[in-house]
Every structure is written in structure tokens, then in C-alpha cells.
Amino acid sequence: MKKVITYGTFDMLHQGHLNILKRAKELGDYLIVGVTSDDFDSRRGKINVQQSMMERVEGVKETGLADQIIIEEYEGQKIDDINRLGVDVFAIGSDWKGKFDYLSEFCQVVYLERTKGISSTQIRTQHNHLNLGLVGNVKRLWKVANEAVAINGINIVGTSGEGHDNRLDELPGYSFEEIIDKSDAVFIESDVKDRYEQVNYALNHGRHVLCDLPMAIGAKKQRELLKNARKNDCVLMSGIKTAYSTAYYRLLLMVKSGEIGDVVSVETTCTSLDEISKLSEYASNNIWNSMDAWGATALMPVFQILGTDYVDKKIITRKTDSYFDLFTRMDFVYGNAVATAKVGKGVKSEGEMIISGTKGYVYVPSPWWKTDYFEIRYEDQNRNKRFFYELEGEGFKYELVNFQRAINRGKTINYTSDKVLEEISKVYDDFYGGNGVKRI
């Protein structure tokens, strides 16, 4: 029996895919199709895939052309598969011509002509066109605009907010009302005190919203925003880029599966220094304080891992005036665990995350919020495990892709639950209202 193998993402299966599979099938008696995993696609830079791995596997299965379907998960797997499965022919599209000649040492390599004018990229671009407006301080938005250009179908229409950055000179500036009028959706990373009104305005005008956290100060206002999004049939998603990192998501799954036993402590630290030396200049220069800059990020894993039903909370902050906090520490006591989240702006510390359990612990080195690597450590060091997941850029493109996907499907993808969103908003309400806050 002559075995043929081919590989692909097979996103949004189309006639071009079918033609490749048919031609590959004709080369032998038994066709093996390798479907790339979500992780492997991400590591190869294919972050704009619209369907999950299982959806793509089902699509290939429904063609009836594959005798066997396998998952491609790592670089170098093709050689392993060819040897393990006794493959005679490796077939791939002609756009890869020459790329896989090295496999000829193990089997026959055939490059198949692709169907001209058809590709998943073209289909995504045609069906996923999204006019996106950026709202907030321009100096903080250029990274978003820079990463958005790598995503098929997203068109940045302009910015709305304070400040100037010559890296965004090609983008027009508008008032908030104007950019809502010109956009299908908006990315909001404005001052915390402005977000509730801006998100509400956008939702009431039928615009989808991707907003940095907190979206509002106070759990009640956060619930109102979520209710308003449902009423207006709009997608409202949280904009903490860490939540969309493959490594961070896998970390959460492993912790919740009991890999380190029962979690007894979560510790997060997020700090950064500013070039401005005089603290009195912060407010006038529109520089975020430590809570606005880092609070939601530091709190997210605490509530995602331990939940929101803590029994006691203490906030200690060092403030230079009524607005700016240089450093804030938030302690939470649960029935069987504790947590600490530390944030600083103008203060520097090791930005790590440690999750302690009864069987071991998770260590994420600085900067943990850009998670692309973490370790699970045990008493017996020989059992320690290391996990690597490549993260491109600052991570904005991952949340933008998921935002775009949610809009296309007409359903919000909850990487951060409503309860967590509300609890983060509540902590901010307590912080600014002075509820349980000790100032030093």
C-alpha cells in the first residue's frame, strides 16, 4: 500500500484545499492529513486563523478524502511522521516549492499546483473587513496600530485622544464622536475615569468595543456595560493582552487541572519606571498612576485562579497627591488561600508571578504579563517542567484577532469572565473611594 501525507492549517476549508487533497489522494492508496494545532500555527506566525483546531479537523474529515488525520504540533514532526507511519510520498502546495526538499531523503516529495485565485487569506480579508478606531492617549496606541497591520481585514481608520506620536502621523485624528461614526468597532485605552461613558456611547451607536480594564469604576457600572452590549447585539471584550497569550492560557489550564495540587497562594508584581523625575508633573502630563497602569493586569490571575469570593481585602498605597499612587499593594484572604498583587509606577521590582500549591509551584519570570515561558517546579527538581510558547510583539495582535473572530461569529469570547470583570471594577471603586485603603 502506497501512503501519501500532506499538511495544512485548512482554515475556512475552500475549493483550493479540496483540490490539493484530491491531487494528493491520487498519488497513492492511503492519504494521511496533518492538521496544524493552534499552538503550532501561533508559533509559525499564523495568528489570524478563524477556526479552532477541532473545527478544522472536522472540515477535513467531512471531505471524505482523508484516510487518517493527525495533528502537527512541533517543528521537525514531519520527519518523525514519515518514519513512524511508513509514508512513501510527501505532498504539499507549490507555493512551498523547494522548502521541503530535505524530506526527499526519507520519501518522494511532490509539489502540487495550487488553485489560482483562492486562498484562506483572501477569504478572511474579503469576509472580515473591520474598520477599527483607536481611542486613548496616542503615545500608548502606536503599538496597537503597529501590530494591527499584520491582521487580514483590519483597517485602522484613525485615533481619538490626547498626545502626539510621529509614528502615527499617517493616521488622521478625530473627536470621539467622529471616530465612532467612522468605525465598525473601537479599541479603547483611555484614562480609566473616561471609559464607562465612552464604552456606553459606542455600544449605544452599535459599535463593538475592545476595552482595557477596568472598563468602569464599580461593579454596578460594569454590569450595566455588559447588559448594554447584549441589548445592542454588540461584542464587548476586555483588552488585557495577557489573557490572550497561549502560554498564559495553558498555565491557567494546568493550574486548574491540579498539576501543582491545591493553590494556596498567588503573587503578582507589575512595576515600571517613568522618564519624568518629578512626581508633581505626573498629573499635568497625563501619566497613568500605578493602579491605572497595572492594577487590572496584576489582579486578573488572582481572580481567575482563586475566584472572587475572598473573605477579606486590604489595600496599602503610597500616594504623592490625591490622584497619583507611586506604589500599591493589594492583599486578599480566602477561606483556604491568600493572594498579593503589587503595582508600581516610578518604582521598580522583579515583575514575576508565583503560584504556590500543595504539590509544587508555578514560576513565571519577569515580565510575567508577557508570558511566553513558565516553569512548574517540584520538591524533586528532576520533575521540573519548562514550557515555551512564542509571543510575537507586545501581544496586541492576539487580542485583536480574537476580537475580530468574536465579531464575525456574533458572540463574545470570554477570556475574562463577567465575574472577574466586575470584581476588578469593584477593587478600583474601593481604591478610589478609600474603602479599606491605608495610605502611607
Image (cartoon, helix red, strand yellow):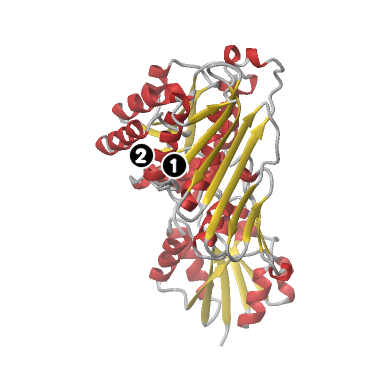
Q: Which residue is mark 1?
A: 403
Mark 2 neighbour class, 10 Å CA radius: few under 14, some 14 to 19, many 20 or more: many
Q: Is residue 151 visible?
A: no
Front-most of residues 384 and 113:
384
Residue type at the position of mark 2: Val
Q: Decide if residue 331 is in sight here.
A: yes
User: In the rendered image, which quarter is residue 379 located in?
Assistant: bottom right
Q: Position of residue 116 (x, y in %)?
A: 51, 53
Q: Which residue is mark 2?
A: 235
Q: Decide which of tag 1 and tag 2 comes sooner along the chain.
A: 2
Q: CA distance from mark 1 to mark 2?
A: 8 Å
Residue in the picture at 34% in, 30% down:
221
Q: Position of residue 111 (x, y in %)?
A: 62, 65
- Of 155 and 404, which appears nearest the observer? 404
**Mark 1 residue element:** helix
User: Where in the figure is residue 106, as x and y percent of width and height?
Assistant: 71, 77
**Could you tell me how many numbered marks the image carries?**
2
- Quadrant for the C terminus in the image: top right
Quarter the N terminus occupies: bottom right
Please tell me which residue lies in front, 214 or 266.
Answer: 266
Type of amino acid at the residue the image marks with label 1: Phe
Who's the residue at 70% across and 61% down the image? 98
Q: Residue at x 41, y 28 (%)?
A: 217
